[in-house]
Image: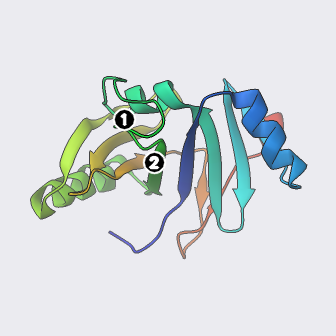
Amino acid sequence: MEQRVTLITLGVADLGRSRAFYEALGWRGQEVEETVFFQAGGLGVVLWGREKLALDCGLDGAGTGTGTGFGGVVLAHNLRSPDEVDALLAAARQAGATVTKPAGATSYGGYAGCFADPDGHLWEIAHNPGFLLAEDGTVTVPDFGSL
């Protein structure tokens, strides 16, 4: 696994409120299918409903409230192919991770799975053909208005 993060997804209680907060700080986001994407230097920050995020990571949605259970943050590591996703999930499992969601096709035309590290921190391992990765691993959030 390359030592990098491509996306940080924050599980939020109220998408509109959270987007307004970040935009009041000067960030500019794009909303697509109840998800807000921000370019943040060489990575992306994503706002998504907390329970939807938990379910997408293979958790049952229980304990998604603040203070207990699911922490509401998922780190993503994007790769260049589905085969790389499978290999990294296998390596994570061998290193002691718990695969919470086996890799499979996604609604956005990609391929992804999730694991929890030994302390329960969630990672999404994904191939998303719409998010371009530079040679150094930095990601560019697409212009959703042009899609």
Could you tell me residue 53's position as x and y percent? 47, 32
- At a point 89% along the width and 48% down the height, the residue shown is 24
- Do labels 1 and 2 touch, CB within 8 Å? yes
Is there any visible trace of residue 147 in the rendered image? Answer: no
Residue in the foreground of this view, choosing between 112 and 134: 112
Relative placement, left or right, of 31 versus 1 is right
x, y percentage for residue 38?
Answer: 73, 50
Which residue: 48% across, 41% down? 72
Q: Residue at x 43, y 40 (%)?
A: 67
Disc 2 crowd, CA 10 A, few/some/many (<14, 14-19, 20+): many
Quickly name the residue at label 2: 74
CA distance for labels 1 and 2:
8 Å
Q: Which quarter of the figure is the C terminus placed in?
A: top right
Q: Which mark is residue 110?
A: none
The x and y percentages for residue 87 are 23, 56
Q: Type of residue at label 2?
A: Val
87 up-or-down from 107: above or below = below
Going by the numbered disc 1, the residue's amino acid type is: Cys
